[in-house]
Amino acid sequence: MNRVVSLPTSPTFLKALAVAVLVTAMMPAGADDTQALYQAQCASCHGEDRLGGIGPALLPGNLSRLKPQAAEAVIRDGRAASQMPGFSAQLEDTEIASLAEWIYRAPEGEPNWGRDEILASQEVTHPDGSLPDVPRFDADPLNLFIVVETGDHHATLLDGDTFEPIHRFKTRYALHGGPKYTPDGRYVFFGSRDGWITKYDIYNMKVVAEVRAGINMRNIAVSADGRYVMAANYLPHSLVLFDAHNLDLMKVYPAVGEDGESSRVSAVYAAPPRGGFIAALKDIKEVWEIPWPLLTEPVVATGHMATPLAPQRSHATPNFRVRRIPVPDYLDDFFFDLEYEHVIGASRGGQGGMVVNLDSGEKVADLPLQGMPHLGSGITWEYQGRRVMATPHLNKAAVSIIDMTDWTVIKTLETDGPGFFMRSHANSPYAWVDVFFGPNRDRVHVIDKSTLEIVETLIPEPGKTAAHGEFDRYGEKLLLSLWEEDGAVIVYDGETLEEEKRIPMNKPSGKYNVWNKTRYEEGTSH
Ligand code: DHE
């Protein structure tokens, strides 16, 4: 028997029904629905397993720098200057909210990125030796700059004498850490947060090889002879070694401590006088040294390393085997003395740091540096007959200056806010430090290296972030980023501190001068 059910039509009932319908519509979709939505709308660009594709990886670790609300806005409105379209026409607000929440959840299984995945990702478009050996432009190849533009994920090759852009090209999404050059300055390697390593032939202005070393990568380092590239990963916990010629995979090192504990790798650095890589491990109390085989002929370096690279001083055999150096604390962010005899590491919690002798493996000093010293952007110079190093702090409005002969803090300079990057050059009397965080992030301080005083504070564009300096090869001109989408690289006279030129750029971050980087200039990062 069929029965017709008649619903009550009272105003109270109808109101309750309307509320119920509205609440259901506002409820986030279930995880299964969201997963299906992801597969239908997002997987083609971001990968079925969220590991990335044309678009970036969408896993919690890769998204740690994007707030969920901002993720929601990107899904709804798209991202300018990228291939990410807005989905407001296809998806309900609740679906967008569910997707934005879901991508921050850990995937059910730990994503895997091992030998097979690395090998499958490699693409060699121009095998080593297949392109002409002369630059296709007329500029000093040793005074070029690469400028990374994070606004639309591009890089610009800039003439370091005329400050005219030579070529602008697309990069992988979200590069991080400095690009690294081969010692002749012909090739540059970029590392992206999503794990991609790109080898770019500067002379021919072409990407020649790419490989994906991990899912969430920190940075890369290139051996002093330009023959090896090492990548440091948060996910998976690994270091990965490549032959630099075509980015052929050589070895994967699971980052596991002596006690069996697995660790994220914070960063890897090349230590030329030691003939090896040094790795910072976030979750184990060890520093790793991995020596590369020496060439029979030593590589000649100039700048502060005016002599041929010192014979290998490492205590490890040059066979890519890990030498573990146990340390008393978790060390995260590194600075090295010029000889690479000591590593100065910041404690993981950001409260202080320590100095470890890399030969003996002994701690030689504690550094009473509160407020997250950003040692990675530290610099060094001669001050009153002794060598000092200076570092900004990420959590404190200060620059600390340390005597490297006895590791005491000789001066704490008050700044207008916490800073990120510090720069100088052996030929410049000044050190530049930005005020990256807080209301004064449009300011840059200029410090006199002979008096350790701030002598000038520049505001290139009120209200706009000014950050990250880099000198030309002669230490005469300082390039500063106006870190905005409608930003610029500003060229200053390093002596008079007068602005000379603005080159429009899309959120320029780091600038890297070939000479300074390949000569391990004392006033810049390496
Ligand atoms: Fe970086 C370099 C770590 C956040 C831009 N950054 C480095 C290096 C390390 C490091 C270890 C040195 C590696 C190298 O050059 O090979 N950075 C960290 C962090 O731990 C931190 C605080 C948090 C994180 O999530 O990674 C961090 N870094 C940032 C940013 O937010 C910056 C400003 C913007 C961005 O693009 O991510 C940023 N980091 C940079 C740049 C360099 C860098 C531009 C290279 C500087 C140089 O001149 O060499």
Image (cartoon, rainbow, N blue to C red):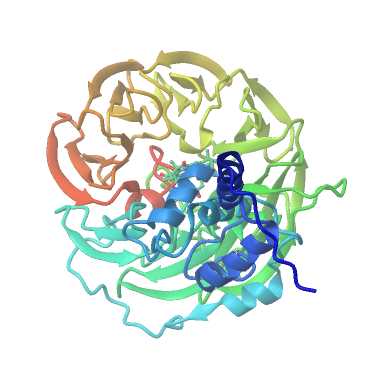
Q: Is residue 110 visible from the viewing direction of this image? A: yes
Q: Position of residue 258 (x, y in %)?
A: 85, 47
Residue farthest along the right direction in this orientation = 259
Instruction: State whether residue 53 is above or below residue 143.
Output: below
Q: How many numbered marks have been drawn onto this rendered protein structure?
A: 0
Which quarter of the rendering shows the N terminus?
Answer: bottom right
Res 477 quadrant in image: top left
Q: Position of residue 278 (x, y in %)?
A: 63, 49
Residue 396 in the figure: left or right of residue 331: left
Q: Position of residue 217 (x, y in %)?
A: 58, 55
Q: Is residue 319 visible from the viewing direction of this image? A: no
Residue farthest along the bottom direction in this orientation = 130
Instruction: State whether residue 176 is above or below residue 292.
Output: above
**Residue visible at 44% across and 43% down in the picture:** 525
Residue 4 in the figure: left or right of residue 206: right
**Residue visible at 30% across and 24% down in the picture:** 445
Res 295 quadrant in image: bottom right
Res 474 quadrant in image: top left
Instruction: State whether residue 475 is above or below residue 410.
Output: below
74 or 341: nearer the eye?
A: 74
Q: Position of residue 284 (x, y in %)?
A: 76, 41
326 or 506: nearer the eye?
A: 506
**Residue visible at 36% across and 67% down in the picture:** 186
